[in-house]
Image (cartoon, helix red, strand yellow):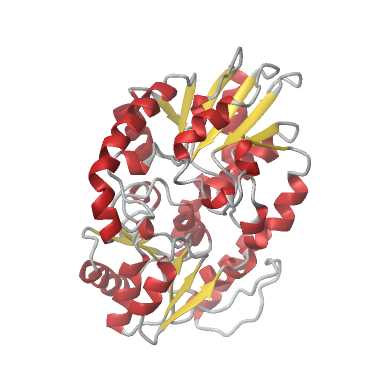
Amino acid sequence: MRPKTNTRIALVQDYLKEWGGAEAVFETLTDIFPDADIFTTIYAPQFFGPHRPRLQHKWQNRVHQSFFKYLPFGYKLLSPLRFLSPLAFKSFDFSDYDLIITSATGAFFPNSINKKKAKLICYCHTPPRYLYGLATARDTSTLFYRLVNIPLQFTLHFYRLFDFKFAQNVDQFIANSATTASRIQKYYRKNSIIINPPVDLPNKPAMDGILSAQRTRDSGKAGGQPEGSEHFKMSSKQKFYLTGGRLARAKRYDIAVRACTQLNLPLKVFGRDFSGYQNELKKMAGPTVQFLGEITQEQKKELYSQAQAYIFPSDNEDFGIVAVEAQSYGCPVIGYNSGGIRETVINGKTGVLFDELTPKSCILAIQKFQNSKINPVDCIQNAQQFSRQNFIKKINSLVSSL
């Protein structure tokens, strides 16, 4: 089902100044509703990396920014000035719209908008992690943080009150996972429906190529590029492990780096640095750890198909798109048993989960994985439920029902 063609739709995102899972979801929403206007506090495509040309072309003449765009270095001031975000969202005029869909990453307060007569749907990636005691990207071990923590907690108390109030403005919450749905119920006292994020799975020719490569590996025969595969190489599995994504502290890539360093295992780390975390990782990394920086989607696909496993030590992850991406290319996942990963990885079948957020626990999981017989085909099949097509179908069905 498609929404009525005369329905005027607005799409709202906290900000558009980096690339991660939330931005990938938002891009799909803009594809589903190509005529919808886009509203955000600030738009800084220079930080989209290899995604910049595609997104600038798609979103040309569609993006409306708030007064943050007029501030010198506004993209750097978003965090300390987040208390102004309700004013930024309230400055937009939505009087001509029938439906507003907010993509709430938990950074700002997009549901503070004046929705007028419009219905408001919120696709919630998570309630703000920094308000409810969940791990964030910030370094809380510094002297500065310890000094400001007491007045900061006083401020956050009022933020929580405002966050709850703005959440009551929403007509329908969509949670990206059961983990997030439980948070929405706990902190907002609101029900939600679960629509998992869209994952860019291999198309059928590529899938046939992956399965053909797997059969070749299983039979022990050398093989070239399978017919019908995508442009990336369907190489044989190599000895390295893989981790990465948005290099933020809450993702706890330090666990993977320390574990592989202690085991003397090759580890490749990809992704863009966030708040200096990459430098911290480099200082603790041994000679077997390689940092690739930000990579293209094609490069990532090749790494997935080659890696022994993807290590995902994220602390209470909201969903974890990258863990599903890895499985879709036959790459098992070794992950911390918390949050959304428990909904996407089948322990013992498509990966190995560990129960303590420590290098030792991760090491034991890696060793358990090395002695297991996880079939990459099971990983591929498990990932199919999170397809882009399923996401589009569910979003269209929901919008049409309003």
Q: Is residue 246 placed above or below 290 in the rendered structure? A: above
Camera-nearest residue between 371 and 164: 164
Residue 4 placement, left or right of 261: right
Is residue 52 visible in this depiction of the protein?
A: yes
Q: In the rendering, at what x and y percent does residue 46 appear?
A: 66, 57
Position of the N terminus by quadrant: top right
Camera-nearest residue between 166 and 227: 166
Q: In the rendering, at what x and y percent does residue 73 appear?
A: 59, 52
Q: Residue at x 74, y 36 (%)?
A: 34
Residue lying farthest to the bottom in this orientation:
287
Residue 260 placement, left or right of 118: left
Residue lying farthest to the top in this orientation:
117
Residue 229 placement, left or right of 294: right
Is residue 370 visible in this depiction of the protein?
A: no
Q: Residue at x 34, y 70 (%)?
A: 256
Q: Residue at x 26, y 36 (%)?
A: 154
Q: In the rendering, at what x and y percent does residue 394 appear?
A: 56, 32
Camera-nearest residue between 146 and 377: 146
Position of the C terminus by quadrant: top right
Q: Is residue 381 placed above or below 242 in the rendered structure? A: above
Q: Quadrant of residue 351?
A: bottom left
Q: Quadrant of residue 208?
A: bottom right
Camera-nearest residue between 16 and 324: 16
Q: In the rendering, at what x and y percent does residue 370 appear?
A: 32, 75
Q: Residue at x 44, y 79 (%)?
A: 240
